[in-house]
Amino acid sequence: MNKLRNSTNFKIISLYWKCQLLGWGTVSIYWAYTVYTRDSYGIFFTFLNYVLDIAIGVSLTHLYRYFAKKYHWNALSLGNLAARVIPSIILLSVAYMELVDFKWHWTSVGTEVQNLGECQETKGAFPNFNYSSGQAVEARASFLKKGWTENGQS
């Protein structure tokens, strides 16, 4: 049996990758549920956001792991390690927010086009829909805020 397993090209996924995919996949399911229910994203854009959330999270944390291993952070004293980890956390959080912000900007343009029919029914919230992508995001945010407060949900 052992020879059969070794003779095939079957490679077991390492614990590292299982944890990466399980962790980012789980939190991305929550975020996908949120955009689908709260922001009324369609199935396509919900799935697109799900995939992009996983890709962003895995990419950044894997890059962090690569640098930590390359520069042997595991061999550092606690003080030297903290001097590298704290700035790394700040850098990673800024990079994460920028990438997610770009993702939201990019996908929100698509959802605006997808929801164009609905938007025109909102009594002028998106007149003529002649916005740049940045203006579309701002217009949508304004509309959602206005709709939220008008329904007595503020």
Image: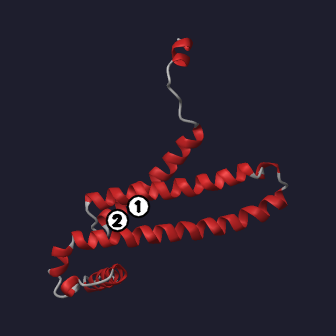
Q: Secondary structure at mark 2?
A: helix
Residue drawn at x 31%, y 61% as measured from the top left: 45
* Residues at discs 1 and 2 in contact (Cβ within 8 Å): yes
Q: Secondary structure at mark 1?
A: helix
How far apart marks 1 and 2 lie (CA) works out to 6 Å
Between 67 and 28, the one lying in front of the other is 67
Q: Residue 38 occupies which quadrant of the picture?
A: bottom left
Residue 31's disc is 1
Left or right placement of residue 121 versus residue 38 in this view: left
Residue 24 sits above or below residue 142 on the image: above
Q: Residue 142 occupies which quadrant of the picture?
A: bottom left
Between 132 and 47, the one lying in front of the other is 132
- Amino acid type at mark 1: Trp
Q: Quadrant of the C terminus?
A: bottom left
Residue 7 sits above or below residue 76 on the image: above
Residue drawn at x 25%, y 62% as measured from the top left: 42
- Count of residue discs: 2
Residue 117 sits above or below residue 7 on the image: below
- Amino acid type at mark 2: Val
Residue 151's disc is none
Residue drawn at x 29%, y 86% as measured from the top left: 146
Residue drawn at x 41%, y 61% as measured from the top left: 31
Residue 35's disc is 2
Between 59 and 27, the one lying in front of the other is 59
Name the spot of residue 129 as percent of width and height, x first: 22, 83
